[in-house]
Every structure is written in C-alpha cells, then in structure tokens.
Image (tube, rainbow, N blue to C red):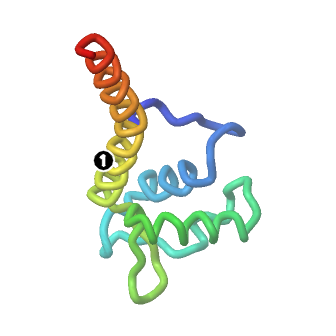
Amino acid sequence: MSRKRKKGAKATAASMVMDTLKKRGAVDEKSAVDVSAFKNLPYATSTISYTISNLIEEGVVGKTNDERFYYDDLGFKALETKFVRGYSMIFIVPIVIAILVYVLQKVL
C-alpha cells in the first residue's frame, strides 16, 4: 500500500475520500467535516456513502456523533499492516511448502 495512489479519473473512491479528508485537515474529531465535503467527487452519492461506510468499518475513517467524518491515520496503518500480512502469507506459505517438499524428496 505504500505505492502512490492514482490521481484524477483513475483514482479510486476510497483514495478520493481519504484525500478529501486530509486536504481539509480532518484528522481528528475536532476537525471533522460534514458529508458536504464530498459533494464534488466524481462518483455517485451511493458510491461515496458505501465507500465511507467501508472505511469506517475498517477504522480508516472516523465518525463523530453529529455525523461528521475524519481520517484516522492509526486506523489506516492498522489496515495496511493487516493487508501486508495477508499478502505475505499468500507468498510465504507456498514457498515454505515448496522447500519442505524439496527437502523431503532429497532425504527420501
């Protein structure tokens, strides 16, 4: 996830939502912004609301009691760690199995 996010038409709704929050300085409950901050994004309202909902579930976006939103950097780092671990396992487990099979073939 450390690669650069695409800008413009190729940017994802999630990256646009996070960029909007960061640009407006909405990084905690005190600086949170209301939903109108996302009105100029080039996606349908339903797409933006679905994206914000998913980001809230993942802990990347926080929501205040008065329906305002902010970017949670700690939540993003936790999601990034979870993502990296998941993909690491996709590569590490097959490599370990291949090494074990190779060693067993040589021993037997």
Residue most extreme to the left: 107
Residue 28 on image: x %, y %: 30, 68
Give whichever of 82, 45 is nearer the camera.
82
Quarter of the figure with the C terminus: top left
| Left or right: where 8 falls relative to 24 | right
Residue 61 on image: x %, y %: 42, 66
Amino acid tagged 1 = Thr
Residue for point 59% across, 63% down: 51
According to the picture, the residue beneath numbered tag 1 turns out to be 81
Q: Quadrant of residue 43?
A: bottom right
Give whichever of 55, 108 is nearer the camera.
108
Residue most extreme to the bottom: 65
Q: Quadrant of residue 46?
A: bottom right
Quarter of the figure with the N terminus: top left
Residue 2 on image: x %, y %: 39, 34
Answer above or below: position of 59 versus 65. Answer: above
Residue for point 73% across, 53% down: 42
Q: Quadrant of residue 79?
A: bottom left
Residue most extreme to the right: 44
Q: Please, what secondary structure does the residue beneath circle 1 have?
A: helix
